[in-house]
Image (cartoon, helix red, strand yellow):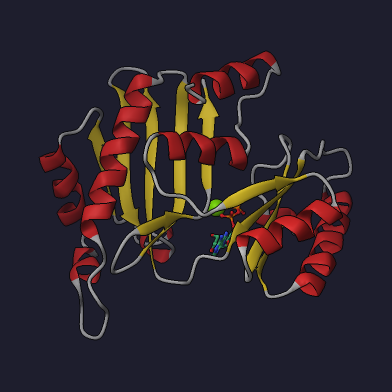
């Protein structure tokens, strides 16, 4: 049973343009885009239970249709190492959210594995009224924000085009292995680009998509945050 059309229909019925992280990551999984293991908890007891099931260290984040930038409201807590830290973080997040956004509707907390730090890349998609969806690729952090070292291609892309997107950016040497940095799994990135291309071409309801950041390892990659905005 396909989840993606259901998730989109459900959000549309609820008059929501912004998908929850749990929804966006479920869609990613359906399209073969690797994401952190995650579960949606509705209360403190569930949060602790799911943290144990996923395995420490974990990350907790607020899940609310009214909060797009979770860390801006103190809604993200990283690297929680045991039950005690999880309980404290649960209370802290609830307190922060109430303080910063009193009326936000809270769906729950997403409990997820803590992805070890690594090279961060960004894959995005944005729909151009004239050309349709375009894919974006770049390295995370200062590379995108300060240096604007990003590249775009109109979807759908071929595998050769996905490979080109990687070599297009100036920071490419940082991916292919530079000094003591091991080479990143570029094949995994190419696969993510191709699957994102397929997702946005099959679902024209998607106006914007943002996988930011994706941790890339010497073997494999993991999407840590996923945002999808509907038309
Ligand atoms: P925001 O809505 O503020 O963008 P994110 O989910 O991106 O929230 O979390 C903020 C930052 O916390 C991320 O950019 C990343 O550096 C870190 N982070 C989030 N989730 C994880 C995770 N599962 N593992 C490791 N780091 C994470
Ligand atoms: Mg983010």
Q: Nearer the viewer, residue 46 or 14?
A: 46
In this image, 154 relative to 74: left or right? left
Direction from residue 114 to residue 78 in the image, left or right = right
Residue 181 lies left or right of residue 46; in this view the side is left
Asked if residue 194 is positioned above or below residue 138 in the image, the reply reads above
| Position in image of residue 183 (x %, y %) | 22, 71
Q: Position of residue 50 (x, y in %)?
A: 71, 55
- Location of residue 222 with respect to 102 vertically, above or below: below
Towards the viewer: 14 or 208: 14
The answer to which image quadrant residue 83 occupies is bottom right
Rendered residue at 61%/40% (across/down): 22
Q: How many marks?
A: 0
Vertical order, 12 against 214 (above or below): above
Q: Residue 109, position in %: x, y?
A: 74, 49
Residue occupying the point 31% across, 37% down: 195
Residue lying farthest to the left in this orientation: 160
Residue ranking furthest to the bottom:
180
At 15% from the left and 40% from the top, the residue drawn is: 159
> From this viewpoint, is residue 102 visible?
yes
Confirm whether residue 169 shows in the render.
no
Q: Measuring from the top left, give residue 162's x and y in whole percent.
A: 19, 43
- At x 25%, y 85%, the residue is 180
């Amino acid at each position: 049973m396909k989840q993606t059309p259901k998730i989109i229909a459900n959000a549309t019925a609820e008059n929501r343009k912004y998908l929850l992280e749990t929804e966006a990551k479920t869609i990613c999984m359906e399209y073969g885009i690797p994401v952190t293991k995650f579960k949606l908890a509705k209360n403190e007891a569930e949060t602790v239970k799911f943290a144990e099931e996923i395995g420490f260290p974990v990350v907790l984040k607020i899940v609310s249709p009214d909060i797009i930038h979770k860390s801006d409201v103190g809604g993200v807590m990283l690297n929680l190492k045991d039950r005690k830290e999880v309980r404290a973080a649960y209370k802290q997040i609830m307190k922060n959210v109430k303080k910063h956004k009193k009326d936000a509707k809270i769906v729950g907390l997403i409990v997820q594995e803590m992805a070890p730090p690594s090279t961060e890349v960004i894959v995005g998609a944005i729909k151009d009224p004239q050309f349709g969806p375009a894919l974006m690729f770049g390295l995370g952090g200062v590379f995108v924000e300060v240096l604007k070292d990003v590249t775009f291609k109109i979807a759908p892309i071929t595998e050769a085009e996905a490979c080109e997107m990687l070599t297009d950016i100036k920071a490419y040497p940082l991916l292919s292995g530079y000094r003591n940095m091991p080479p990143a799994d570029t094949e995994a990135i190419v696969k993510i680009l191709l699957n994102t291309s397929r997702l946005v071409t099959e679902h024209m309801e998607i106006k914007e998509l943002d996988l930011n950041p994706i941790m890339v390892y010497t073997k494999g990659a993991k999407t840590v945050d996923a945002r999808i905005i509907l038309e």
